[in-house]
Image: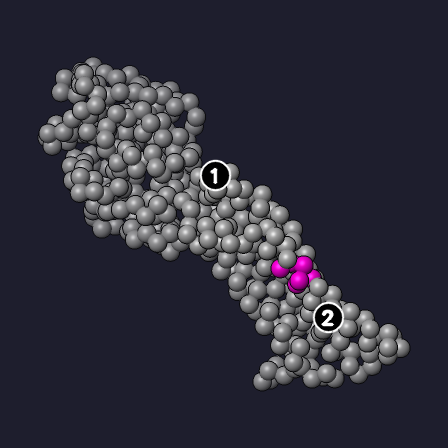
Amino acid sequence: MWKNSPEMTQPQDTNAIEVSVVMPCLNEEKTLAACIRQAQEAIKAAGLRGEVVVSDNGSTDRSVEIAESLGARVVRQSKKGYGNALMKGFEEARGKYLIMGDADMSYDFGELPRFIAKLREGYDLVMGSRFKGKILPGAMPWKNKWIGNPVLTGVLNLFFGTRVSDAHCGLRALAKDAFQRMRLHTPGMEFASEMVVKAGMARMRIAEVPITLHPDGRDRAPHLRPWHDGWRHLKFMLMFSPTFVFLLPGALFMGVGLLLVVSQLFAPADGPLHAGPIRMDYHWSIAGSLLLLLGYHVINVHYFAKIYAVTHGLREPEPMLDRMMHSLTLEKALLAGLLTMLVGLAADGVVLWCWIQQGYDFGVYFRAYTRLGIFGSTLIALGAATIFNAFFFSILGDPTKYGRD
């Protein structure tokens, strides 16, 4: 029934293959043939040496049979997931340039030459943009079009400095060497976000090509689960953006906490501090101490996450982080923590001494001594945390792992 396509017979000189069109496939027998033919015709019309690679993810229908009969090269990925299927296809692809697209007829592979043209101009990643192009009626659910895609794309652009209009378009192209540099690893739908995130973090050149999204040709529900997969995309981006998840909230907590604790030291000895109509008694020192300690802890987690990501190859080294690891040695951090604790102990020692000298009763000045005691105890906790964190930083940033002499 399905005839081989002679023009797509694999070339003997595999090094001459310029373009590999990779299609993830899981039970796509209804639409796969049309997608393969469309890709083959686009490659031939553009005068390219290319191949179609179908990365089968465990199909139980006739998808594999159809792909092979049409001259496509089938690779098999036993690990389930959209990302796993694409990574297997990319790894097995022989082309200098990789084109990925779903095998459900929602994308027009006839637009392939425009992607290749951008790659030849030197771009590392070329994204299709449905929002700059056209979305045909019935091609995208309203919640994806007006909520999911815009929100997730906006978050990605904010966190990683990219400027794409459609971060989750399934039709895109990238150079094979860019794929190897990205070190992609996510198994599911969040693979689409990971590709853009890694490209942005590595300062790769990204271009966009307006495309048309068509209603898919399936006779079943799509594999995509909007809310579940949307959360996976968001969770992945949060995990890879410690600045927004940890550093900024931590700096806010620590700044507000420090302001509250220090301002209370300048309050009247026998009364509350007034900030306009607001009466700020010594209880505000407790809230300030809590925020200060919480913020300090969260900021440390930010640096833990960044160092871990660098030492495990999940992100490129950053100059500022590298300078910090060189200059902030374990010994310096231990000394800073110890000095902070000593200042705190001195403050609490003053409070204890005065309490004893006044017959174990602060009288009308209990507010002043309470504030000073909270301040001292907070410094003791910060110093102790610094000492323990210094050892953990040293373990994470081991020179042999971090690539330092």
Q: Residues within 10 Å of mark 1 (few under 14, many from 20)?
A: few
The tag on residue 347 is 2
In the image shown, does 90 or 350 lie closer to the viewer? 350
Do we see residue 394 in this rendering? yes
Asked whether residue 39 is drawn in magenta, I would say: no
Question: What span is in magenta?
Answer: 336-341
Position above or below: 291 against 369:
above
Mark 2 residue element: helix
Dot 1 falls on a residue whose secondary structure is loop
Write down the quadrant of residue 274 in the picture.
bottom right
N-terminal-most mark, 1 or 2 = 1
**How many marks on residues?**
2
Residue 311 is situated, as x and y percent measured from the top left of the image, at 48, 41
Point out residue 114 in the picture as x, y percentages from the top left corner: 16, 40
Query: Could you tell me which residue is drawn at 43 percent across and 28 percent down?
Result: 80
Q: Main secondary structure of the magenta part?
A: helix
Left or right, residue 388 beside residue 352: left
Residue 394 versus residue 113 in the image, above or below: below
Q: Amino acid at mark 2?
A: Ala
Measure how far apart labels 1 and 2 are at the Cα level: 42 Å
Q: Which residue is mark 1?
A: 312
